[in-house]
Amino acid sequence: MKPLRLALITALGIAGASAQAQDVKVNALFIGWYTQMMNNNLRLNGAPLSADLTVPHTLSYYSLAGSKGTGSTNPYNESGFSVRRAEIYLAGKITDEISGNLLFDPNSPAPLLLDAFITWKPNAKFEVKIGQLKPIGYEATMVAAADLLFTDRAQVVRYSSDVRDRGVMASVQLGDKAFGAKLGLGVFNGETGRVNDSSAQKDVAFRADLNVGEVHKFGAYLQQGSTSKADTKGVAGQPASFGAASATNLPPSALEILDNRDKTSTYGAYYAFNEGPWHADAEVATGLLGRRNSVFQVAAPTAAAANAFPGALRQHLDQRFLGYQVTGAYTTGHHIFRLRCDFMNYNQGDKWYTTYNPYTESAPGTLRSDLADYTPKYREITVGYTYAFNPALIRKANIKIDYIMRSKNFLAPRAGQTGEQGGDSMVAAFQVWF
C-alpha cells in the first residue's frame, strides 16, 4: 500500500477512535457516475484531441471546464463507469475560538488534499481562515458537493471559482438573519492550484455575501493580481501559446509578456432564490485569462505548431473570458425536476494577433475548408431529474440523471466527417452521504 494512502487510513482510524475526546466530526461522500455520449464523434476523433494542431483549439478549451473539480472524471469519454467523488471530511473544534477542517479525496489526482484550513473566530461577527480553500464564488464555496443539484457544477463555476488556493481570508458579519451581509477580504498565493507559493506577487480576493431572510441570497466577488512566476524563464522564453511568429501571426515578444506580468482577474456576481418547492439561481463571471493559461514554455514548439495555430488556450494578453449560468428547480416529494442553461466564452471580444480570424478562416478572407467555427464559445442546456430516497435529507442518498445538450463547435471533423462535431451526453450519478 502506498505510504500516503496508508497515512490517510491511519489518520481516519485515529480520528474515529478519539472523535468524542477531540470533538471531531467525520463524514464521507461517495458519488458514482455513468456517462454515455450520444453520438460516436469521440470514437472517430480519438482521445488525444488537444494534440490536433489543425485548428486553434479542439477539446482543449472545453475540457478545462471539467478539469478543476475534485475527481478525475473526463466528462467527454464516450461511455464508462467512474468514481466521481470519494471525499472524506474532518471538522474539529479545538476551543470555542479555534476550529479546523480537512477534506481529502483518495480518488482525486494528486495532491489528494483538497481543503485544509484553521478558523479563528473570537466572536460571532468576525473570523479568520488560514490554509487551503476556495476564495471566491457562490456555487463553488456556498453549495457543498453533496448538495449540488446537477451531476456537476456549471462551466463558469468549474473554471472561475472551483479552484483552491493557499492564503488567508478575514470576514465580518453584519446585520442579522432578516437582512445580513458577510464581507470577506483575503490574500492568496495566486498559483491557481494546490501548491506552495513560487510567485513574488500575491492575489487579493474580496467578496460580499448578502441575504434577505432565507429566501434571497445575492452577492459579488473579485480576485485579481499579477505574478513574476514566468520571469524565471527569462526573456528568451518562447511565447508558445500565441503561436510561432510569421507574416500573418505577430505574437507579443517575450519581453512584452514579462512586462504584462501575466495579469489575471475574476469578477463575479450571483443571486439565489429558495422558497417552498421552488429554487432558482444565477451566476456570472468574467476576467482576464492571465496565468490560468500560461504563455511560456522552455522547449521550442513542434514543427506542426510552427505552421499552424496550436491548441492555443490564450491568443492575446488582454484575452478575457465570460461565463454565466441560470438554474431552476422544482421539488415534490421524492422528486426534483431541474433545468440549467450554461454559457462560457474563453475569448470574449475575439482577441488574437493574426491578420484574420483563425477560428473561422484559413487565410485573410478565406473561410475554413470545413466551414466550421471553432470560436471557444460553448453553450450547454442540461435537463435533469433527481430521486431522493429521503425527501427530508436529500443529500443522504439520491440518484441523478442529466441529459446535457452541448454546442457543436468543440471537435474538429476528421476523415469521413463533415461540419462541426458536437457531443450530447447522458449522465447518471448515485450519491451516498454518511
Image: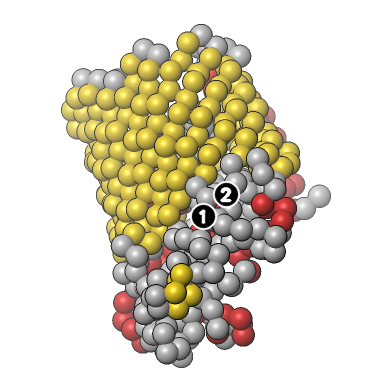
- Which residue occupies the foreground of this view, 246 or 198? 246
Residue 402 position, x and y percent, is 57, 31
| Residue 390 in view (yes/no) | yes
Q: Which amino acid type corresponds to the residue marked 1 in the rendered image?
A: Asn
* Callout 2: SS: loop
Left or right of 431? Residue 269 is left
Residue 101 position, x and y percent, is 49, 39
Placement of 104 over or under 28, stated as above or below: below
Q: Determine which residue is flagged by label 1.
A: 409
Placement of 421 over or under 357, stated as above or below: above
Residue 37 position, x and y percent, is 66, 42
On residue 422, the disc is: 2
Q: Which amino acid type corresponds to the residue marked 2 in the rendered image?
A: Gly
Placement of 318 over or under 272, stated as above or below: below
10 Å neighbourhood of mark 1: few (<14), some, or many (≥20)?
Answer: many
Residue 32 placement: quadrant: top right
Residue 31 placement: quadrant: top right
Report the residue at 60% width, 21% height from top.
398
